[in-house]
Image (cartoon, rainbow, N blue to C red):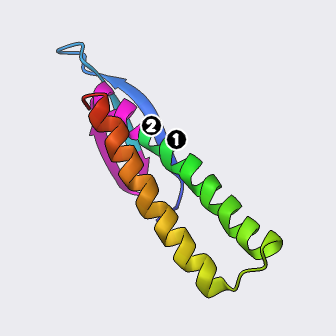
């Protein structure tokens, strides 16, 4: 199995309903447009979170010179609070 992920558009010629096909190696799945957009937005959100995590770890290690045990604890706390913040943000938007 290859690790390559491919994403392609599709349409039912019978119903004219569009969809998205996601393939990872020999596994494939079909998503509605709404599902595909939801996954795409989630990928963007976690990409941003990963970048924030990397900065926090770098800052704590390189600037503050904190030991990795403290860095890991702070990162876990930061992630928990970010999750709480995201839930509150979505709740306030009615999502």
| Count of numbered marks | 2
User: How packed is label 2: few (under 14 Cα within 10 Å), some, or many (20 or more)?
Assistant: few
Q: Looking at the image, can residue 83 be seen?
A: yes
Residue 81 shown left or right of residue 27 in the figure: right
Q: Is residue 29 above or below residue 50?
A: above
The residue where tag 2 is placed is 40
Residue 90 image position (x, y, % from top left):
32, 36
Please tell me which residue is depicted at 26% across the width and 32% down the height of the picture: 95
Q: Is residue 48 above or below residue 76?
A: above
The residue where tag 1 is placed is 44
Please tell me which residue is depicted at 30% across the width and 45% down the height of the picture: 29
Residue 67 got which mark?
Answer: none
Q: Are marks 1 and 2 in contact (CB under 8 Å)?
A: yes
Q: Which residues are magenta?
A: 23-40
Please tell me which residue is depicted at 77% across the width and 73% down the height of the picture: 64
Q: Looking at the image, can residue 25 be seen?
A: no
Q: Secondary structure at mark 1?
A: helix
Q: Quadrant of residue 16?
A: top left
CA–CA distance between discs 1 and 2?
Answer: 6 Å
Residue 28 image position (x, y, % from top left):
34, 48
63 inside magenta stretch: no
User: How packed is label 1: few (under 14 Cα within 10 Å), some, or many (20 or more)?
Assistant: few
Q: Secondary structure at mark 2?
A: helix
Q: Is residue 30 above or below residue 71?
A: above
32 inside magenta stretch: yes
Residue 48 image position (x, y, % from top left):
58, 47
């Amino acid at each position: 199995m290859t690790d390559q992920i491919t994403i392609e558009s599709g349409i039912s010629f019978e119903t004219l309903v569009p969809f998205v096909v996601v393939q990872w190696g020999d596994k494939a799945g079909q998503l509605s447009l709404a599902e595909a957009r939801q996954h795409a937005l989630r990928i963007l959100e976690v990409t941003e979170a990963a970048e924030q995590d990397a900065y926090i770890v770098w800052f704590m290690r390189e600037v503050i010179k904190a030991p990795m045990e403290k860095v890991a604890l702070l990162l876990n706390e930061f992630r928990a609070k970010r999750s709480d913040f995201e839930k509150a943000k979505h709740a306030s938007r009615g999502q």
